């Protein structure tokens, strides 16, 4: 199965989370994270992550009880903007959830055009 390349949007969100995290294990995981698969829901998507097998596991509370709140976003393509959540399994980042605050999120992330990430 071919893995999709991370979109500019997914990359920006993961970089945003890593830059603001005080969790060194999470930063190391996200530095080499790849997208394993993407599931669009119509109002967002779930991007399942592939993390290096030897990556350090996070012991932060969100890594076992999650999720970790990511940035909110604004885009002309998504009327009310949206948010992001990072989900974990056994201390490893597992899935990036992207959701719109409305009834539409484009199936192709490039359709977002310019976007702004901000604290939630």
Image (spheres, rainbow, N blue to C red):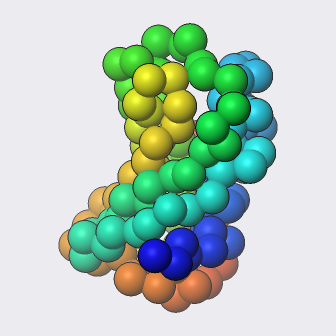
Q: Is residue 109 above or below residue 88?
A: below
Residue 22 relative to residue 111: left or right? right
Q: Is residue 110 above or below residue 47?
A: below
Q: Quadrant location of residue 46?
A: bottom left
Q: Quadrant location of residue 28?
A: top right
Residue 33: x, y in percent?
Answer: 66, 51
Residue 32: x, y in percent?
Answer: 74, 49
Q: Is residue 15 above or below residue 89?
A: below
Please name the residue shown 56% across and 12% down the image.
59
Which residue is at the front of the view, 81 or 63?
63
Q: Quadrant location of residue 39?
A: bottom left
Residue 81: x, y in percent?
Answer: 43, 64
Residue 73: x, y in percent?
Answer: 53, 59
Please name the residue shown 35% across and 19% down the image.
65
Please name the residue shown 63% across and 38% down the image.
53
Whether residue 16 is visible here, answered yes or no, is no
Residue 6 relative to residue 63: left or right? right
Whether residue 2 is visible here, answered yes or no, is yes
Q: Give the total number of marks visible in the rendering.
A: 0
Please name the residue shown 53% across and 31% down the image.
92
């Amino acid at each position: 199965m071919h893995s999709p390349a991370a979109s500019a949007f997914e990359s920006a969100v993961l970089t945003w989370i890593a830059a603001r995290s005080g969790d060194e294990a999470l930063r190391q995981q996200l530095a080499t994270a790849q997208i394993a698969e993407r599931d669009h829901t119509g109002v967002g998507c779930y991007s399942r992550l592939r993390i290096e097998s030897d990556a350090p596991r996070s012991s932060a509370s969100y890594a076992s009880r999650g999720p970790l709140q990511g940035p909110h976003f604004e885009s002309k393509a998504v009327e009310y903007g949206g948010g992001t959540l990072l989900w974990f399994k056994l201390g490893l980042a597992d899935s990036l959830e992207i959701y719109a605050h409305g009834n539409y999120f484009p199936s192709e992330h490039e359709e977002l055009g310019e976007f702004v990430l901000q604290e939630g």
